[in-house]
Image (cartoon, rainbow, N blue to C red):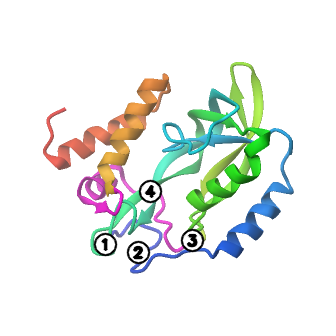
Amino acid sequence: MSKFAVNPPPTEPVDLSEEARRVHLTGFLAKAPEPDAIWVFGAGSLIWRPGFEPAEARNGTLHGYSRQFSFWTIRARGRPDNPGLGLALEPDPGTCQGKVFRLNSHSQDEDMAALWYREMFSGVYFPTWCPVVTETGMVPAICFVGNRDHRNYAGRLPEDEAAAIIARAEGEWGRCREYLDLLVDALEREGLEDADMVRLRDRVDHHDGVTP
């Protein structure tokens, strides 16, 4: 489908077992820099729908990464015959602005289990502890980096090709471009900047026949 993609779109979804997710989460939390203060960095839908009630939320800047539509989705926002693209953090010389959320200690175990089910059901991310800069200091946060060893990994596609894919794809959770719209709207609402995502939405509008 794309001569630029690292991998072709998969024909079947990949799901990790509940046991595999549990073991992975246990091992990951064992390496937490501050076990009593777990922070999660939201670069995509976690910004507007974290799925838990945080003890604290701040705007934050992650250095050395950017948000990119870099993996194939054939269920949530695409289908095997019409694959879409999902969002991940990718190593980059620049920065990524997002939200950081500190989990409540009384619900931390339940919140982390739900977060792993949501973000790690197929293993397309490589969760990484990263320092995130906030107005009141740096916090170590869980960042969902793209897993380059996963068969769903597409890599960084040319902007116009990514826009064409996003414009036409649709899956169980709706159109792929709807996700991009929600993202850009959330960034603007929270006072976060990402010129690349705004420009990508303009390109999607062009492919979708929408007048900006």
Disc number placed over residue 8 in the picture, else none: 2
Amino acid marked by disc 1: Met
Along the horizontal axis of the image, is 5 left or right of 136? Answer: left
| Front label number (4 vs 1) | 4
Mark 4 — residue? 86
**Label 3 Cα neighbours within 10 Å, binned few <14 / some 14-19 / many ≥20:** some
Q: At 37% across and 39% down in the image, what residue appears?
A: 182
Q: At 60% across and 71% down in the image, what residue appears?
A: 149
Where in the figure is residue 175, as x and y percent of width and height?
29, 54
| Cα–Cα span, label 3 and label 2 | 11 Å
Mark 1 — residue? 1
Q: CB under 8 Å between callouts 2 and 4?
A: no
| Front label number (2 vs 4) | 4
Mark 3 — residue? 150
Residue range highlighted in magenta: 150-173
- Where is the N terminus found, in terms of image quarters? bottom left
Determine the image quadrant of residue 145: bottom right
| Cα–Cα span, label 2 and label 1 | 7 Å
Which of marks 1 and 2 precedes in the sequence?
Answer: 1
Helix or strand or loop: what does disc 4 sit on?
strand
Helix or strand or loop: what does disc 2 sit on?
loop
